[in-house]
Image: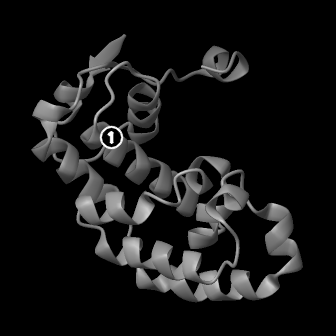
């Protein structure tokens, strides 16, 4: 059973964001709107865990987009998150290519960046509603991929569903 992206966007509450991220990221349609949405969804996923904003440089998915994240977050209206990325990036004296694969080892040897990132955690709001609203407003520029319904139950957990 599946839903399409545009059907999901008819609702007011954000749903299936991780599955939407996967569908758009692996999709055939590439345009600036899709890239903006994918970046915002990746940012949300990487920074919503225990590492907070530091997840932006620890997780390879997010770190690979560090050069475009501020612009993409600004585009969806998440200006505080965009500023947090800029601020974090300004405090890492490495080239983008060095950051692109994640900085777990570098952060271990430079604990001040973790303290700085922790201070930034309170300065930005969750981007969930902003990216959802942006997707609703930009439906014409977004493809309409099928979004598989998350399977529940014992067998789906056992077999990775």
Quadrant of the frame with the N terminus: top left
Measuring 65% from the left and 67% from the top, which residue is drawn there? 50
Picture coordinates of residue 66, whole percent (x, y): 53, 60
160 sits to left or right of 136: right
Task: Using the rendered view, name the quadrant where residue 31 is placed.
Answer: top left
Q: Is residue 11 above or below residue 127?
A: above
Picture coordinates of residue 67, whole percent (x, y): 49, 60
51 sits to left or right of 80: right
Residue 21 in view: yes
Q: Is residue 76 above or below residue 2?
A: below
Measuring 67% from the left and 56% from the top, which residue is drawn there? 97
Which residue is disc 1 drawn over? 15
The colouring scheme, among rainbow, by chain, secondary structure or one colour, is one colour
Quadrant of the frame with the C terminus: top right
Picture coordinates of residue 6, whole percent (x, y): 18, 27
Picture coordinates of residue 92, whole percent (x, y): 67, 78
Measuring 23% from the left and 66% from the top, which residue is drawn there? 77
Crowding at dot 1, Cα within 10 Å, few <14 / some 14-19 / many 20+, comes out as few
- Secondary structure at badge 1 equals loop
């Amino acid at each position: 059973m599946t839903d399409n992206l545009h059907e999901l966007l008819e609702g007011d509450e954000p749903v299936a964001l991780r599955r939407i991220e996967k569908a758009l990221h692996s999709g055939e349609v590439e345009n600036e709107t899709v890239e903006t949405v994918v970046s915002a969804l990746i940012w949300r996923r990487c920074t919503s865990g225990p590492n907070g904003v530091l997840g932006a440089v620890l997780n390879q998915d997010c770190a690979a987009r560090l050069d475009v994240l501020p612009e993409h977050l600004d585009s969806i209206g998440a200006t505080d998150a965009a500023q947090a990325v800029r601020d974090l990036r300004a405090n890492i004296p490495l080239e983008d290519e060095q950051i692109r694969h994640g900085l777990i080892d570098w952060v271990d040897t430079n604990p001040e960046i973790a303290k700085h990132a922790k201070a930034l955690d309170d300065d930005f709001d969750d981007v969930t509603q902003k990216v959802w609203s942006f997707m609703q407003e930009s439906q014409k520029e977004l493809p309409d991929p099928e979004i598989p319904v998350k399977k529940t139950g014992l067998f789906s957990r056992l077999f990775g569903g």
